[in-house]
Image: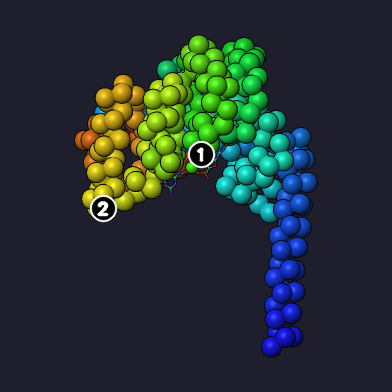
Amino acid sequence: AKEDGRGRYRVFEDGMNARIQARRSLEVDLRRAIARQEFTLYYQPQVDARTGAYDGAEALIRWHHPERGLVSPVDFIPLAEETGLIGPLGEWVLRTACTDALTWPANLTVAVNLSPVQFRDARLATTIRGILAETGLPGSRLEVEITEGSLLQDEQRTLTILRELRTLGIRISMDDFGTGYSSLSYLRRFPFDKIKIDQSFVRQTPEDKDSAAIVRAIAMLGTSLGLKTTAEGVETQAQSEFITNEGCDQLQGYLISRPVPLEAITALFAGSSPL
Ligand code: C2E
Ligand code: CA
Ligand code: CA
Ligand code: CA
């Protein structure tokens, strides 16, 4: 039994070492990946729920690792955040998204995800202003999507950054709405333009009565507060109809399109309305 226990401990330890090793090698690769241009942005369209017309697209990063293949942002964004690489990576995302959006019809916006770690840099708004100036994209065509994590930090600094972004005409979306601890109080304290209803609620709508009730309540909340609402993760016609009937403004999800490379989104935008 003793031996058995030791053996198991060793297996556990080896497993941990292996994980630490894997993480280190991924970190080394991540540092090289920007210079080697291994990242690309995919774009997922957002449509006006009532007219079905395109409103714009959300930029979603992809990493084509030379040996590992496609690495999900869910796996490398946290590592980029821990290592500080999210700074240069986030700037690359912003610059690329602004440049790409300039090739789309002028009424369409691009939405970029910002990490809470990017908000620790008080110069974030200045950096974004510089990227707008450099690329020539009007601020009114840029949206930033932030999660509760960004609001949990130094409140004054975050508020200052968000207000600066708004003076540039940039719209601010609260991502994954409904999953955090204090979503409602944040709506009151920070200057949002839009709330994105988390896919976990959308996914089970309309069959699950509780999810349907939550989607309805968030849509009403948006209307009352004068905020746009976007439902993300819309996969079925039934979801689309229910959500639109409840007064949601925008739809995003596989029903309309999966995230696609720039050439494909440009082709979609050149075509007619998907709905
Ligand atoms: P998110 O911002 O909540 O993005 C939505 C995620 O849902 C995306 O996953 C998208 O591909 C996926 N999705 C969209 N529609 C559907 C649908 O109908 N069904 C299903 N099952 N999924 C759908 P993705 O691209 O893997 O991104 C995951 C997360 O990684 C994002 O969640 C975001 O938090 C983060 N992320 C992605 N790109 C960036 C980036 O450039 N910067 C930062 N900081 N984070 C990013
Ligand atoms: Ca997002
Ligand atoms: Ca989301
Ligand atoms: Ca998310």
What residue do we see at 65% from left, 39% from top? Answer: 81
Label 1 neighbourhood size at 10 Å, few (<14), some (14-19), many (20+)? some
The dot on residue 25 is: none
What residue do we see at 72% from left, 86% from top? Answer: 2
Give coordinates of residue 227: x percent, y percent: 34, 24
Q: Is residue 59 left or right of residue 218?
A: right
- Front residue of 76/222: it is 222
Label 1 sits on residue: 260
The residue sitting at the left extreme is 245
Task: Let me know if residue 156 appears in the view.
Answer: yes
Label 2: state its secondary structure.
Answer: loop
Please, is residue 174 above or below residue 26 in the view?
above
Q: Is residue 19 left or right of residue 233?
A: right
Circle 2: residue type: Asp
Give coordinates of residue 72: x percent, y percent: 59, 48
Label 2 sits on residue: 208
Q: Is residue 260 left or right of residue 247?
A: right
